[in-house]
Image (cartoon, rainbow, N blue to C red):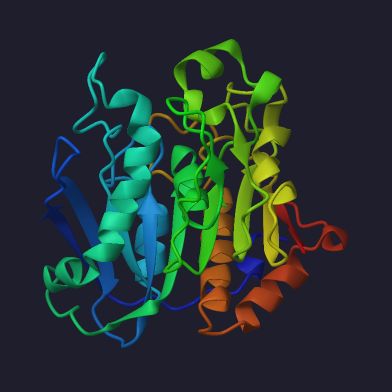
């Protein structure tokens, strides 16, 4: 069996616009946003997407283009830890980059009308009641926080509820598990926002994608660490896609032929594309038939060679 055994939705033309600049008082820099959207269609659901640490919204075309060509408006933020511009060493904002990411996403939600007006022909064609947060790696934590993940602020020692009721579900790709003694010394020292994460308050529907060879190097537990967002979540409507042979970039979801992809594999990328799209269509109420077919094809009993889908 291959990824072509899964449902495939016919693509349409898309338009992408960047940068859309949103004033961001207190951030130190304005927030730059990229939007990708189908040129046709009404009541389009929205995906707000958070990139990984040190990445850029110019990346993730294998996912962003795939989703937008099949009926979703995808809004990507340029977070402060992006390659352009990167927060310099010693910048006082650096310990709070995790928090600024969440604020970036909320600012986008606050300014959706402004964002949409900057895209030719998009205004009035979106459905603000159907918004999903998605993200890869560090961006997976950002998406998780919007649906209830609580992170202990390393500055205050407090774990506030920073969820946003406008977000109905999340897709978390190759993201971090719990902290504590299982973090490597490097992660504990340099990524303090990973030290204490509480997934139990996540109640919204959730899809977690994890590679079974994801040796991200931030935990002593190896690939199992990235399954924590699924296992420890409080959601009663959650699913886990395990990508066989998948490393941190899951075959290349951050871009075509990018240098950081160590497991470049078009079939793995196609698997992630098709499963995430089927989930997005299901969770936003467009159509659940592809999701049911996908679940059937990727059950443990079916022994699909590319991956396995588990749901609760």
Q: Is residue 116 left or right of residue 229?
A: left
Residue 73 sits above or below residue 44 on the image: above
- Quadrant in which the N terminus appears: bottom right
Instruction: Report the front residue among 55 and 70.
Output: 55
- The reply to whether residue 54 is in sight is no
Name which residue lies at 66% across and 68% down.
5
Q: Is residue 41 left or right of residue 230?
A: left
Residue 246 pos. (x, y %): 62, 40
- The reply to whether residue 46 is in sight is yes
Residue 118 pos. (x, y %): 11, 68
Q: Quadrant of residue 300?
A: bottom right
Instruction: Report the front residue among 6 and 70.
Output: 70
Q: Is residue 109 left or right of residue 67?
A: left
- Quadrant in which the C terminus appears: bottom right
Name which residue lies at 49% across and 30% down.
193
Residue 179 sits above or below residue 163 on the image: above
Residue 253 pos. (x, y %): 46, 47
Q: Quick one: which residue is furthest to the bottom in this view?
A: 42
Q: Quadrant of residue 303?
A: bottom right
Instruction: Report the front residue among 149 and 133.
Output: 149
Q: How many marks?
A: 0
Q: Quadrant of residue 245?
A: top right
Residue 132 pos. (x, y %): 45, 65
Residue 303 sits above or below residue 260 on the image: below
Name which residue lies at 45% across and 28% down.
156
Q: Is residue 48 left or right of residue 134?
A: left
Name which residue lies at 25% across and 44% down.
78
């Amino acid at each position: 069996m291959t990824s072509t055994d899964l449902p495939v939705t016919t693509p349409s033309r898309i338009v992408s616009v960047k940068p859309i600049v949103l004033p961001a008082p207190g951030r130190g820099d304005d927030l730059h946003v990229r939007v990708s959207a189908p040129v046709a269609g009404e009541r389009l659901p929205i995906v707000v997407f958070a990139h990984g640490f040190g990445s850029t919204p110019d990346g993730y075309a294998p996912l962003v283009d795939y989703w937008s060509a099949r009926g979703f408006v995808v809004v990507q933020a340029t977070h402060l830890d992006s390659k352009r511009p990167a927060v310099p060493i010693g910048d006082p904002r650096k310990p709070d980059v995790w928090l600024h990411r969440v604020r970036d996403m909320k600012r986008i939600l606050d300014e959706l009308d402004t964002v949409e007006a900057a895209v030719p022909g998009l205004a009035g064609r979106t459905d603000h009641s159907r918004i999903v947060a998605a993200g890869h790696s560090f961006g997976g934590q950002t998406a998780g926080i919007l649906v209830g993940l609580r992170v202990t602020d390393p500055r205050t020692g407090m774990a506030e509820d920073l969820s946003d009721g406008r977000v109905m579900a999340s897709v978390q790709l190759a993201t971090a598990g719990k902290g504590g003694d299982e973090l490597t010394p490097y992660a504990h020292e340099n990524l303090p926002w990973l030290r204490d994460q509480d997934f139990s308050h996540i109640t919204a529907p959730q899809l977690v994608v994890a590679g079974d060879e994801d040796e991200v190097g931030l935990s002593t537990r190896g690939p199992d660490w990235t399954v924590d967002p699924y296992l420890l979540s409080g959601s009663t409507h959650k699913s886990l896609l395990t990508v066989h042979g998948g490393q941190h970039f899951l075959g290349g979801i951050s871009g075509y032929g990018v240098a950081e992809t160590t497991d470049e594999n078009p079939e793995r990328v196609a698997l992630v594309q098709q499963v995430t799209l089927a989930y997005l269509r299901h969770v936003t109420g467009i159509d659940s038939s592809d999701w049911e077919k996908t679940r059937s094809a990727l059950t443990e009993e079916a022994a699909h060679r590319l991956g396995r889908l588990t749901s609760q």
